[in-house]
Amino acid sequence: MNPPVDATTTDAWGRLRALADGFAPDLRAWFDADPGRVDRLTFTAADLHVDLSKGLFDDDVLHALLALADEVGLVERRDAMLRGDHVNATEDRAVLHTALRLPADTTGARRLHVDGQDVVADVHAVLARVYAFADKVRSGEWTGATGERIRTVVNIGIGGSDLGPVMAYEALAPYRQPGLECRFISNIDPTDAATTLAGLDPASTLFIVSSKTFGTLETLTNARLCKAWLLDGLPDADADTAVAQHFVAVSTALDKVAEFGIDPDNAFGFWDWVGGRYSFDSAIGTSLVVAIGPERFAELLAGMHAVDEHFRTTDLAHNVPVLMGLLNVWYADFLGSQTHAVLPYSQLLHRFPAYLQQLTMESNGKGVRWDGTPVTAGTGEIFWGEPGTNGQHAFYQLIHQGTRLVPADFIAFATPAYPLADEVDGRRQDVHELFLANFLAQTRALAFGRTADEVRADGTPERIVAARVFTGNRPTTSIMAPELTPSVLGQLVALYEHITFTQGVVWGIDSFDQWGVELGKKLAQQVGPAVAGDETALSAQDASTRALLAYYQEHRRR
Ligand code: F6P
């Protein structure tokens, strides 16, 4: 693997620094002076309509960002990833989540034979098994140990083995099969298992243990709790039969699945070249396939593939994920933004920001580059968000008038999932139109603000004029699509995957490892015996940990 180019030493970086020095964006003036700005800065990727015109950049900045992409070798690295080179340098692995959505009839070089594996054939062989399983559950052919059909599927997983499936299950609620519910257990807080299982009938409940490594403490603990709950609830069933009929697993470690007691015939595999946070479109999405059915899941994969193709084939100046990734670098490294808000105007996407947090922050929250040298620029913004309009009544105040720059992506759909109408004073009001009006109003207010003179013109008393001024020039990207279908959801996910990749390449980091989660896991094992009262383990702790443990011992109700 070539060493990363140090972006901060490139000509383009120097140019961007010069442009940022004294940068005085004025979106009102830019829009007035340049009637072509919106057309020029609106792009299409598959069904996604992406308007970058309310971003804080001009043509000089854009050209310098594109030059930066050239100088750091973005195209070469993208192609290396797509052809299966080991771009995950610290784990010496290929990174091929894009192969999970290659069509079965892919031919030529895109067919991908990596490290001796016919990737496309293997992907579709597993998909066929997942689809057959899902069909059996959906049709009622798959029954529990007492012969009852399955009514609830509980996915047990955490991180990438949870966030993607939950996010998509919520987002695609209108596509779910009635009478078949999915629930999700992730946290090792026993509250999660207790409340998720509450009210369920073991006879009609099926568990999917989802874990890439099958070694994750939370998931294995929860899987054991669920196994005990199942066996307690089915006292007359033979234990092996009950586990075989009520437990399936998804993992790359099929040997460990067998050790846990799950029938290998009921296990779906995937591969080490799929990162956990890039995995919901692998067999990790089995709960989603059960919920929405194979046909809809295939549409989701096709949507992802469409954006992959856009990313692979579109020149950088029109390549939406590349442009969005480069702009994020501009905001973070040159204009000083620390965070990035994602604000879906769709209640169905209420878990999308949480999903993106793992995708972006576990990928790009790194302090060293892929060759181990320290990064030389700020990396990994903090991603966060909530659906509009709820956020408008909570934190938008800070985005509009606070002292920090918060670039924000606004996402909306032309057609609502639930078209409801309201009636006010005899007038019919399409509620989705009210919702969209808010989406449009917010990005407009953020971009163009309100001057002191405009505030005064409303008759505002002078003493509160300053408080009512909106400076504007707060950058937003508006993403619209016809409707939140499975395909469009897949497109959105692939878009953010490639934005994340683009930023990682500029920063020279390995966006596919996650060593930063290891120390905490290790220390939890060391602290565990101390929590249980082991004196030797207790004395090995630092003073603060010992004091907190003393508080615990004193206050725990037994
Ligand atoms: O601890 C972080 C992590 O490794 C994530 O990257 C991953 O998505 C999650 O844990 C769950 O891992 P697994 O699927 O192996 O249980």
Image (cartoon, rainbow, N blue to C red):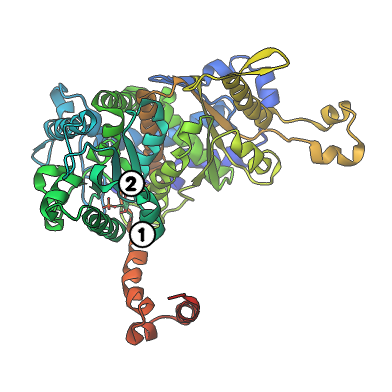
Q: What element carries label 1?
A: loop
Q: Nearer the viewer, residue 436 or 328?
A: 436
Q: Quadrant of the C terminus?
A: bottom left
Amino acid bearing label 1: Ile
Q: Which of marks 2 and 1 is nearer the N terminus?
A: 1
Q: Position of residue 276 (x, y in %)?
A: 29, 46
Q: Where is residue 335 in the image (x, y as percent from the top left)?
A: 59, 43
Instruction: Tell me which residue sits at (83%, 40%) in the image.
Output: 466
73 is higher (above) or lower (below) than 275 = above
Q: Where is residue 151 in the image (x, y as percent from the top left)?
A: 28, 37
State the image quarter where residue 351 is shown.
top left
> Number of numbered discs present?
2
Q: Mark 1 points at which residue?
A: 188
Could you classify mark 1 by the number of other residues whose Cα lies within 10 Å: few (under 14), some (14-19), or many (20 or more)?
Answer: some
266 left or right, relative to 332: left
Q: Mark 2 points at which residue?
A: 200
Residue 511 makes an appearance in the image? no
Residue 295 makes an appearance in the image? yes
Q: Are marks 2 and 1 in contact (CB under 8 Å)?
A: no
213 left or right, relative to 292: left
Could you classify mark 2 by the number of other residues whose Cα lies within 10 Å: few (under 14), some (14-19), or many (20 or more)?
Answer: few
Q: Distance between the residues labelled 2 and 1?
A: 19 Å
Amino acid bearing label 2: Leu
